[in-house]
Amino acid sequence: MIDAQFRSEERYAKLSIAYEGTEEGQFVCSNVDKVIAKYTIQPETYTCNLSDTKDVLVIEYHEDMDREAGEIFEEILKVLDIKKCD
C-alpha cells in the first residue's frame, strides 16, 4: 500500500511517499520521474529505508518562490492514485 505525507513551510515543500516491495517501488519512482520531468523546477529527491520491506521516496523543493511544488505534488498524487495524504 502506498502512503503519502506532505509538509511545507515558507518557500519549502516536501512530499514523502512510502511504498512496499520492488514492484511498488518501480511504479512509484518511474511515475514520479515522469511528472517531475515535465517541469523546469527540479527537486532534491532521495530514498530512505523504513523497514526490511518498506521504503520512502522523499521529494523536496527548496526556495519555491512561486509555489509550483503544490501543482507538481497534486499531479504525482493523482498519477499514483493516492486518495489521502497526511
Image (cartoon, helix red, strand yellow):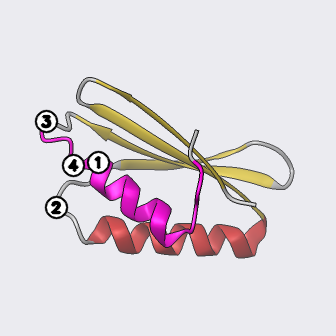
Image mark for residue 65 = 3
- The residue singled out by tag 4 in the image is 68
Residue toward you, 2 or 82: 82
- The residue singled out by tag 2 in the image is 40
Residue type of the residue flagged with mark 1: Ala
Closer to the chain start, of discs 4 and 2, is: 2
Q: Tell me if label 2 and label 3 are in contact, CB under 8 Å.
A: no
Q: CA distance from mark 4 to mark 3?
A: 8 Å
Q: Is residue 20 magenta?
A: no
Q: Indicate the secondary structure of the residue bearing disc 2.
A: loop
Q: CA distance from mark 3 to mark 1?
A: 10 Å
Mark 2 vs mark 3: in front:
3
Tell whether 28 sits left or right of 2: left
Q: Quadrant location of residue 33?
A: bottom left
What segment carries the magenta color?
66-84
Mark 4 vs mark 2: in front:
4
The residue located at (26%, 54%) in the rendering is 42
